[in-house]
Amino acid sequence: MALLAYINPFKVYRDLVRRPIESFVTEQYISYRKKTSDGITSVKELLYRAGVVSVFLSAILWISIFMYVVFYYTYMPNVTHVRPVHLQFKSCDENMGVCSFPSAHVQLTRRNQVLMSSQPYKVRLVMDVPETQINKDLGMFMVCAQMRASGGALVSSSCRSAMLKHRSKLHHVLRTLAFAPLLISGINEEKQTLQVELFSDFEDDQSHPVTDAYVELQSRYIQVLSCELHIEAHFTGLRYVMYYWPKISALIGISSNLFFVSLMFILSWYHLQDGLPDYIKVKLGIEIKNEKADDDKKFIGKVKLEREDSFPFIEEESLLEEFHKLEKKKTETGNL
């Protein structure tokens, strides 16, 4: 019977085939499941850290861009200020024409300072002058301007000469024939644009900022269609680079801000690393210091040390008390 039980095919199949296969499959399944769970945990931690790093990098980048934009609009002034000039004059009572020099008062600003201090400006008067025979025969004439502060205080004044461009009769005829369709349709006009530079390097005074400008054409025969006052900033140094090469200057400025802001973030991170909450330290894998346990250990060690140090003193005091008691007993027996 023992031999039959030993050579039983069902037992042989169970012991030599089924059980080894089941144990092998179970071990493989358990190992695969463990690896999968570890992989999921590592992937979650990796995604968490990547999210934190991306948030910090985006914050640093936007802070750097914001700092450069604020610096640009604070440091760079407005490039051009354009104000219309409405010329006024005194008409003649008896004859036709103008009996006074055409002049105008141009209000630049009412309250705030329109020009940036310590910044050079070019002040120009742009006039559209028709090509009439009177203007051609006029020749040179003077254009004067005064820059005044609030209350009428004179800051600066200037006078410049101007005249129409000379064109010969042949040039005038050929130009009229070439532009005849435009002249007939009204798209183009027979006029010239005169640009008179009144101030080449004007700087506003911070104590007396310019608020008004006074323009005068010193000729009673000049004929003007329209007139504008242009105040353009004349950039030098860093402002010149930032205005004429904006992309390169923006790249350099944002990169510099990014470097310094990143350095500040890193130093702040290492400085405040011990003060982070415990759950963030666990997520980031930072070792948590149990300060309370350390304090308790120090306190227990201190108490223990004090007890160890104080034990000999306590024992010595008790011995002295017993010695005094024995002496008292001896004296009492001697007296008896």
Image: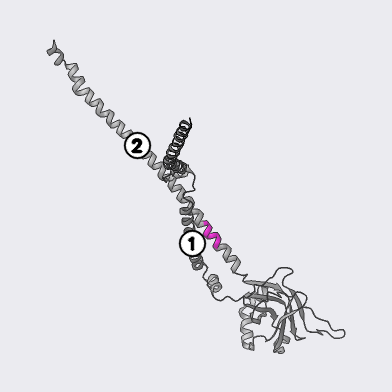
Kindly identify the residue that appears in the image at 75 percent across and 74 percent down.
150
Residue at 69% x, 76% y is 229
Please, what secondary structure does the residue beneath circle 2 have? helix
Q: Residue at x 55, y 71 (%)?
A: 243
Quarter in which the N terminus is drawn: top left
Q: Amino acid at mark 2?
A: Thr
Where residue 125 sits, quadrant-wise, is bottom right
Q: Position of residue 209 (x, y in %)?
A: 70, 74
Q: Is residue 25 visible?
A: yes
Give yes or no for residue 199 being in the magenta stretch. no
| Residue linked to disc 1 | 260
Indicate the position of residue 33 as horizontal and vertical percent values.
Answer: 33, 33
Q: Position of residue 149 (x, y in %)?
A: 73, 76
Circles 1, 2 touching at the beta carbon (< 8 Å): no
Dot 1 lies on which element? helix
Residue 68 drawn above or below residue 3? below
N-terminal label among 1 and 2: 2
Snapshot quadrant of residue 83? bottom right
Please name whichever residue, 73 or 221, is drawn nearer the observer in this view of the structure.
73
Q: Farthest residue to the right: give it.
A: 94
Query: In screen coordinates, is 154 left or right of 50?
Result: right
Which residues are the magenta region? 62-67
Is residue 86 among what the camera can see? no
Q: Amino acid at mark 1?
A: Phe
